[in-house]
Image (cartoon, helix red, strand yellow):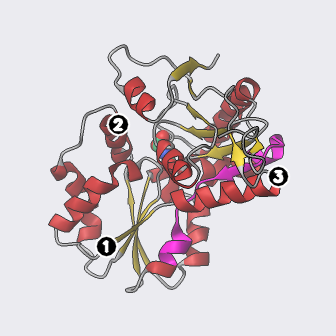
Amino acid sequence: MTADTCPTLQTLPGPILVFDSGVGGLSIVEALRERMPDLPLTYACDNEAFPYGLKSDAWLLERVPEVVARLLEQVQPCLLVVACNTASTVVLPALRERFSLPVVGVVPAIKPAGLMTRSGHIGLLATKGTIERPYTQKLIETFAGDCQVTRIGSNCLVQLAEDALAGKQPSDARLREILQPFLDEPRLDTVILGCTHFPLLQKQLARVAEEAGAQHWQWVDSGAAIARRVLHLLAEEGYPNPCCPDTFARSCWLTAPLETDSQLPQALQCLGFDELKLLS
Ligand code: DGL
């Protein structure tokens, strides 16, 4: 349906740009599409610099605004989603200062986890960078100050999620090994997926945890909250029922060419991103 055929739909002036270091932001794309299947989305990943989880704050503060500036020039989006906890916990103020479009960041879902837990013991699974950031510590103090929070910083799980999307599923044994510090805590009842890559493995993670005796764990990520925030901001900008003009190609921007045998183009195509473009 278009704005011509339905007068309550408002045509957006540009797509929503979803940005991550790799494929993790596709979990945010899925959450957005769940609420708003027709939302015009463009995806971008800084695959040249992947992974972000091992980079310093200073490096991210220089790199992310520079890549975003080049993307904004090419894509002309109406809103930017930084679908990366590792980047968002450092660069959001710098992005908002430099660019005038609305910027939505993704940070670990500590607030909902603090409300959901019954035992008061939460597990935070994120990249090492996110786990160590003062921003994350502040979130914990503000929204889960009375909870015990066990942290797992795993950059390996990020790579496993990339591999899974490229068609190579991780072994159950490897996932169990990563989850072991949570499995050792019998009171823990809520697990935060504090990296956008991890919801891509959630089904397998949950099954592995259940088989290891953790049937009671609740899993929480930021996807649904981000989708609500994006729709709220679009409504505020005057687009309560946004629609997609046919002229917006569903493209995915990369910062480096893919390996010739990469399965990623097929995975992206399944998600509707049928045009791959290299950012110059
Ligand atoms: N997807 C990113 C996040 O949410 C991190 C991936 C990476 O380490 O590059 O933190």
Left or right: 272 in relation to 267: right
Q: Position of residue 120 (x, y in %)?
A: 42, 84
Residue placed at 23% from the left, 73% from the top? 215
Amino acid residing under circle 2: Leu
Indicate if the residue with disc 3 has its beta carbon within 8 Å of ligand 1: no
Residue placed at 38% from the left, 26% from the top? 266
Determine the CA span between mark 2 and mark 1: 25 Å
Q: Which residue is mark 1?
A: 217
Q: Position of residue 79 (x, y in %)?
A: 73, 43
Amino acid residing under circle 1: Trp
Provide the residue span drawn in magenta: 95-114
Q: Which residue is mark 3?
A: 237
Whether residue 61 is visible to the viewer of this picture, yes or no, is: yes
Q: Secondary structure at mark 1?
A: loop
56 shown above or below 227: above
Left or right: 58 in relation to 272: right
